Image: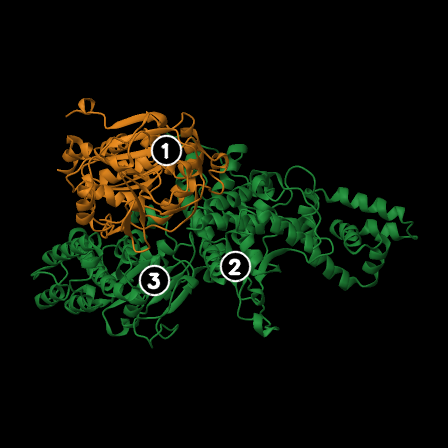
Chain colours: A green, B orange
Amino acid sequence: MTIVDEPDKPDLLTQLSLSLGQVRAEYSPDATIFAGFSWPVYWGELVGPRPCVLVGGRGTGKTTTLRGLAYGGQYALRGAELAQWDTIGAYWRIDSMVVSAFTGRGIPEEDWIPAFSHYANLKMVSLFLGFCTWRNKRLGSQTLVDPESLALTAISLNLPEARDLDELAMGVRHGLAGLEARLNGATNTLMLTPFSALGRPLAYLLDGVSAEDDVARLPFTFCIDEFENLRPYQQRILNTLVKHVGDSRYTIKLGVRASEQRVRDTLAPDQTLMDPADYTTVDIVQHLKDQSFAVFASQVCEKRLAGTDLADMQMSTMFPSLSIEREAELLGAERFRARTRDQLAAERPGPGELATFDAMPLLEACLVGYWAKSQAMSRRAVLAEAASDRRAWEQRVGNYAYAFLFTLRQGLRGTRKYYAGWSTYCQLANGNIRLLLELVYEALRTHVADTEAVDSPVSFEHQTIAASQVGQATLREIQGQSGIGGQLTRLTLSLGRIFNVFAAAPEGHTPEVNQIRIDADNLVNAPRELETLIQEAVANGCLISFAGNKQGLISAETKSPDYHLHPIFAPYFVYSHRRKRRIHLRPDEVLALSTENAARTINDILKTRRRPAVNLPEQLEFYSEFYNAAD
Amino acid sequence: MPLIDEPLYTLEIPTHEFTVPVGSSFLYSHQADEDRATPSPNWFTSIDPDEIDTRTVEVDEDENLIVHPPNGIPTVISLYDAPRLAEFIESLPQPVYLDITGLSHRTWAPLVRATAQAVADVRVIYLEPAEYLRRTFVDAQRIYDLSEKFDGLRPLPGFTVIEPEADSGREHYFVPMVGFEGSRLEYVLSQSEADLTRTYPVIGVPGFRPDYAFYAYQGNRRSFEREFLHRRVQAAKANCPFEAFYLLREIQSWSQDPYMRVAPIGTKPHALGAVLFALANPHQVELVYDNPVRARDRTEGQARVLVYALSAFIAGTQFRSAAA
């Protein structure tokens, strides 16, 4: 393929930037985001009258999906006929700037409940009215609501009488302005006038929609995104509405980053939301695990690239993978084998031993040297073990070959480990489509800038460099993602470095360590602070939580999850991205790793596990001030 | 009146030359944690302490302003109660010098709001620091130092907007007024639904010192590049709220009646300009604020004193024509 210079067509780098570069659904108009929409596999579970909680971190496609359920999205996806739509609903992104105004000021939470309920009433009625206005303008059809219901809606919101939808819409705007003025006024007058009762106005309005109207065909769907921005008492208010979906003409679909950020209580003391009785949970990452994510991600990327000069490229061809054997060769395993052979020769081997060694495949031969060093054995003894029990030896090679790759280029410049292949890229993204698009964009950008034959596969080197850069970029973004972004950055830097040292010096230890378990028996420091740290780390994609200890051998530990450092960081810090083995850390150690003085704790953790000093990889020099703070 | 004929509302004075006039009142932070937040004793030399009404202010957990007179009982007023704050300002000996150097935005912004409703002569004092800590620059884009963490987006008292007109069809502009800390820009971008094609970051140029603008660029580089914002960066003098105000008004004029979200996350004088702009455009401008928790001792020393003629500006044509 060659790049064709057409008038008005931007160059390939610009095309890539435009098609893959900006990937936040929050900012894009409906027409733009749904032009390249790929139906997620869980779509079928979301539509319908049942309330649903969609769980997914930043970049998992949560917003795109929720907007796809709302009227703008359905119009873009299904066209102008309401009868063809999967859902009829509106999108509501919870804005921290708004909902935080209903907190504090010395007013107890319970007293805020009526004020926020009133706001929720006004907001939800205004969302429905917004749909009616849009429908009238865009589709040229009126929504039929009986006048008595309009009057009741207005009265229940303490608004002047409304004879039609426009008057009601104006009244709601005035109601919101009035509430805003009260919030900006003196605290002692804020609660003096009455508020509306939760859910009543919406019930009056939706009950009044004519049965002959197409809108009445489906419950009106409120797609509420960034639910975690609500305070717990505010979540309880919306949960109460979710609880009553069964006897109402609306339904609610919630988007939340991490399930830990959601409370399940309602305003009624004895009623908690239950899954599956009250709602369905869809965890995007779980749904997209393994193959289905690779397929979904390929579709998304291929659709986005369709308008560029790289149209028709398949992701699996564009991003070839690398076998362990081939990777060992590229990382210089031949040198290691030669060195091992010299050492074996110096041990005065018996007849035929050198020939046996020479007949071994590269990786096996290298493992002789690696195993001898890690177990403090002679090469001859290892060779004898390999010959005497083939099965055990092959298993050992299987267990340790990947970890061995990380040791090959210690103390040398350049790439220390490759991260290549479409399936590896999908594993690094871990179900996060935004990260995957960043990986693809970065790799193609580097590839196009450095390679003449742009339609050739992206080299292992370029794939690796891109993966490391996206890891670094993700790391640098953390500090802006959360209120405690500084702590999260330091925690990631600390864990990344620990796993890096473990990977570089694995001899004699468990290979491929990249998870932690926090020893709950050792709560010496403020547990609340730890909880916040871990919760934010999970919500912002630094850590991935998963049920640890599947066997449940130690009952006290079965409830606490383990945490995996997000694999996107693996190429930057250089450790294994494959979900493997864990270390135990005390709560105070985890907290210390998130402070400015983390360096001392990092050193202590490494020392107690008998790890030698390992040079900081070049790309981490950027943070040397942090890592050397203990000196 | 054209801008060029407007009086200057900012006075820049070397610290040692500034004195508080006899008969005036002086409000400053009760909880200063930086050198510059404590008024220099020089300002009150050769003056009988009784001739200046000096009071310190602080804020309690419930967002009440507590004003401590030198002797006697403190006054407590809700920061949301603009009429009572205005009464309090009017009751002080005039002119009132309000030193915002050591005050948080949550404290001084409601006082500025009240000033706009008061019949008073309020002048705002701001001290530039002599130095930010060295690490501030080195780590500007790594792990921040000026702020320890954020309490999260929350409107300043009296500046709540609960219906940000997201679906109104009006053009939305987002104007982050940035400082050194790139993480603050990243945070507000990640937390607010900004239209990136209509986002215009503002940097303090000229800076307190000539080299400061570079640190601001360096600190925000990643967001600028990533979101293609670098070509839309605007400049306003870092220590002048009125220049910031005029710049915001100019940005506003680029479109017919746009809705503007302004994030005052850079210099305090810029934030003052943003607050004034929001007051002058009540239904057209929303302030987005991230509520950073400040690191202690983030600056050293005092450089220049800046005196802003707040009440004079509010009475002037530029403010009133916007508010009209």
Q: Which chain carries label 1?
A: B
Q: Mark 1 points at which residue?
A: B40
Choose the circle earlier in sequence order: 2 or 3. 3
Q: Which residue type carries mark 3?
A: Leu
Q: Where is residue A207 in the image (x, y as percent from the top left)?
A: 17, 70
Q: In this view, does A219 lie above or below A505?
A: below
Side of B228 relative to A212 (left or right): right
Whether discs 2 and 3 lie on one chain: the answer is: yes
Q: Which residue type carries mark 2?
A: Asp
Find the distance from the CA under tag 1 to the CA under tag 2: 65 Å
Q: Is residue A323 visible?
A: no
Secondary structure under tag 1 reads: loop
Q: Is residue B317 above or below residue A406?
A: above
Report the mark closest to the observer, 2 or 3.
3
Secondary structure under tag 3 reads: strand
Q: Quadrant of residue B29?
A: top left
- Using the image as rendered, state which of residue B277 and residue A188 is in the foreground: A188
